[in-house]
């Protein structure tokens, strides 16, 4: 085969350490645009970046030459630096260890984009704990009670 074709669409979520509400409305658009810029600079196509005060959702196409963990690591490191040196100088912002990421069918990307862009309205009626538990359940994961949701309460 002369050409390779890939469509690896990823929906990733990660949370501010200790659920700090750092991503306020005043800086949210700038912060999300910065995150999108990190991904674009690495040649990934970005469909949406959104979230709420304490977490971020990203929908992007992962290049087959990179690993998901290296991309998320770069996003988290660079956005932490940006938050602490540009948006909230000396605030002590950091991301919680880990992340969740799932493939998203290219055919479902528009629904996922709308979901990500509607986070503010979404969280008027649903907590992050509820959202995350439903998301994991929809993806076929059972939440291990040993790890619980203490960090989400």
Image: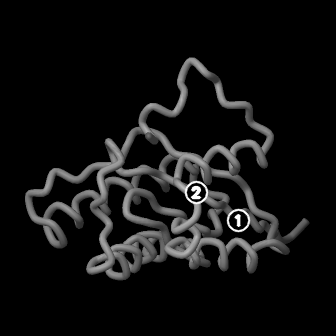
Q: Nearer the viewer, residue 129 or 79?
A: 129
Which residue appears farthest toward the top when viewing the image? 146
Camera-nearest residue between 106 and 54? 54
Where is residue 84, by image quadrant? bottom left
User: Tag count in the figure?
Assistant: 2
Residue tagged 1? 9
Give the colour scheme shown.
one colour
Image coordinates of residue 46 in percent, x first then y, are 57, 76
Q: Point out residue 127 in the picture as x, y percentages from the top left corner.
A: 53, 54
Residue 66 spot, x, y in % from top left: 57, 55
Quadrant location of the N terminus in the rendered image = bottom right
- Helix, strand or loop under label 1: strand
Picture layout, residue 93 above or below residue 104: above
- Residue 44 sits above or below residue 26 on the image: above
Q: CA distance from mark 1 to mark 2?
A: 10 Å
At x 8%, y 58%, the residue is 90
Residue 47: give its label: none
Circle 2 crowding by C-alpha within 10 Å: few under 14, some 14–19, many from 20: some
Q: Is residue 57 left or right of residue 108?
A: left
Q: Residue at x 33, y 77 (%)?
A: 25
Relative vertical location of residue 65 with respect to residue 142 in this rendering, above or below: below
Comparing 130 with 7, the one in front is: 130
Instruction: Determine the image quadrant of residue 153.
Output: top left
The residue positioned 66% from the left and 61% from the top of the image is: 10
Percent x, y of residue 94: 27, 49
Check the image and name the residue furthest to the left: 90
Q: Is residue 67 left or right of residue 32?
A: right
Regarding mark 2 in the picture, which secondary structure is present there? strand
Q: Which residue is mark 2?
A: 12
Q: Residue at x 33, y 74 (%)?
A: 31
């Amino acid at each position: 085969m002369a050409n390779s074709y890939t469509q690896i669409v990823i929906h990733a979520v990660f949370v501010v350490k200790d659920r700090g509400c750092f991503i306020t409305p005043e800086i949210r658009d700038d912060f999300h645009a910065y995150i999108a810029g990190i991904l674009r600079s690495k040649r990934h196509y970005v469909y949406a970046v959104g979230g709420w005060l304490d977490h971020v959702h990203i929908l992007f196409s992962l290049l087959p030459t990179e690993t998901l963990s290296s991309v998320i690591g770069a996003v988290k490191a660079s956005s932490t630096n940006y938050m602490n040196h540009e948006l909230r100088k000396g605030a002590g912002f950091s991301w919680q260890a880990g992340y969740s990421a799932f493939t998203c069918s290219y055919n479902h990307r528009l629904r996922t984009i709308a979901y990500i862009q509607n986070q503010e309205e979404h969280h008027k009626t649903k907590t992050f704990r509820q959202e995350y538990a439903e998301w994991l359940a929809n993806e076929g994961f059972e939440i291990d009670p040993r790890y619980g949701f203490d960090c989400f309460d």
